[in-house]
Image (cartoon, grey):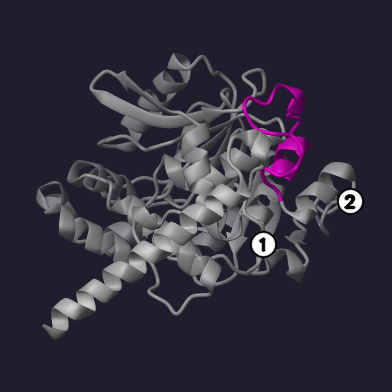
Amino acid sequence: MKGVSSAPGDYVYFKSKVPLHKISIGSKQWRYYDFGPKAVPPLICLPGIAGTADVYYKQILSLSMKGYRVISVDIPRICNHLEWIQLFEKFLDSINVYHVHLYGTSLGGFLAQIFAQHRPRRVKSLVLSNSFLDTHKFAAAMPWSPIVSWTPSFLLKRYILTGIRDGPHEPFIADSVDFVVGQVETLSREDLSSRLMLTVSAASVGPLLLSDSFITIMDTNDYCAIPQQLKDQVTERYPGARRAILRSGGDFPFLSRPDEVNLYLQLHLRRVGVDAKPDEVPGISRDGSAGGSEYEKKFDEHPDDTPQGEGGSGAHDDDHLPQSFGSETHKTDGQVSGSAGISFAHLLYTLLLLQSFAEAMYFTSKTMVKA
């Protein structure tokens, strides 16, 4: 599988434009991206066990360009769910944010619900993707959890990666898996063991004060590491929530189906009353070349033309995007114009140099083997 060195061009652009922030709260370090108009209530993205703040770079690029503020965080080294609630609240205080909209995938969705349960005044809405309500099933599948903190890093990484289906994948899903695998390689033993403990430590989501109408459940219909039974439990818990169904996308639809995910996030934010401020977007061109699919652009021009089910009278209608919007040839959110500081010609030239270098390395290795 490809590693971080094989990062796509839009990720390279993202790293050049969006600064990474690090702050310490007590003994814990928070690593996060914060981009978009500060006057807009933020959408905070919480990754799963294999994710980092970087995995939501496509959402940051696309939604910030449309006038939304997006914050993507790494889950710090936390021992239990009570500590998560307390430290996440302190993190929000430290960046001067009170009301939040949370988008969580897998473990991130579980943590978002736990926080919404215990700090209901701070959470204005939820978007849950491939998530769950309790940790019992994961604890039963990991009887060696008491020694996880002493387990070597390579074994922890292997255990986490075995939960990701190892092909064959459609190309866009394979690319998303490759990217996440590269991110897992950047995590330390302490990071990995902490996330595993959050997944298997006994906990469950209790009743939320948040109305179902302020919750969107966004799931994929194909293979996912979270069992379908657990995803169904989330749907049953929030019968009045809006549903956004992606026909495919695997474990990481925010990377494999970014156009669809970004559209649903934008629909959710508009529905719960978040007003975008596109005129205050920092550092990204507004000419349409910096991101967004043809469908996203059409939605911007005609916001009332929502997908079937979204905005209808039935609160639990399933939303389905047209098949064409899930094609493998979707545009990436990181395509940028010359005015944004990088041209297509420069990008193509860089790719050609990398290809030449790879071919030279391959030829050299073959020669050495024959020798």
Residue range in magenta is: 266-292
Nearer the N terminus, badge 1 or badge 2? 2
- Quarter in which the N terminus is drawn: bottom left
Query: What x and y, as percent, mark residue 308?
Result: 83, 59
Where is residue 235, by image quadrant? bottom right
* Image location of residue 183, percent across then percent down: 35, 50
For the residue pair 352 and 254, the one nearer the viewer reads as 352
Look at mark 2 in the image and give the residue it sits on.
305
In what element is the residue under mark 2?
loop
The structure residue drawn at horizontal position 18% and vertical position 46%, both measured from the top left corner, is: 189
Look at the picture and state if 251 lies above or below 222: above
Does residue 276 show up magenta in the picture? Answer: yes
Residue beneath label 1, please? 330
Residue 353, x across and y down, in percent:
43, 58
Q: Residue at x 67, y 31 (%)?
A: 68
In the shown orientation, is residue 149 left or right of residue 158?
Answer: left
Depth order, front residue of 189/369: 369
Compared across the picture, whether 297 is left or right of 148 comes to right
